[in-house]
Amino acid sequence: MSFCSFRNGEVYKDHFKPGIYVCSKCDHQLFSSRSKYEHSSPWPAFTETIQEDSVSKREERRGAYKVRCGKCGNGLGHEFVNDGPSKGLSRF
């Protein structure tokens, strides 16, 4: 699923039911609900992906990476260095 929707608001930010988050375009497995955490941003946040190749990342500016589906390239959001529930973990 895409993690941000500017028209209708984000519906998965406060969604904590057990399961797997997948890409909205190709159903590629991205994140487990076990790695999801509460964050002050309006989008859902995760500490890790299902597999190493679940997503691809490209640095957009220092400390900020554009995150895309590792299979089809669908845009998923951003990862910020040293942002997360404990130092060194990131958010997508």
Image (cartoon, rainbow, N blue to C red):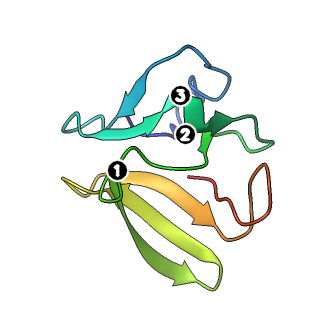
Sequence-wise, which precedes: disc 3 or disc 2? 2
- In this figure, which residue is indicated by the disc labeled 3? 33
Q: Nearer the viewer, residue 56 or 86?
A: 86
Q: Amino acid at mark 2?
A: Phe
Where in the figure is residue 54, as x and y percent of width and height? 32, 52
* SS type, badge 1: loop
Q: Mark 1 and 2 residues: CB-CB less than 8 Å, in contact?
A: no
Q: Nearer the viewer, residue 77 or 70?
A: 70
Task: State the image coordinates of residue 26 (x, y, percent, origin top left).
Answer: 18, 38
Q: Residues within 10 Å of mark 3 (few under 14, many from 20)?
A: some
Q: Residue at x 53, y 28 (%)?
A: 33
Mark 1 vs mark 2, foreground winner is 1
Q: Quadrant of the N terminus?
A: top left
Locate residue 81, reporting x and y percent: 67, 71
Q: Which residue is mark 1?
A: 51
Viewer-side residue, 3 vs 9: 3
Cα separation, mark 3 vs mark 1, equals 14 Å
- Could you say where residue 10 lies in the image, as x and y percent from the top left? 59, 30
For image coordinates 54% across by 26% down, the residue present is: 8
Would you place residue 57 above or below residue 22 in this image? below
Give amino acid for label 3: Ser
Dot 3 falls on a residue whose secondary structure is helix
* Residue 17 picture quarter: top right
| Callout 3 touching callout 1 (CB < 8 Å) | no
Left or right? Give the position of 41 relative to 15. right
Q: Which residue is tagged 2?
A: 6
In three-dimensional space, the C-alpha distance between marks 1 and 2, rounded to whole angstroms, equals 28 Å
Q: What amino acid does circle 1 point to?
A: Gln
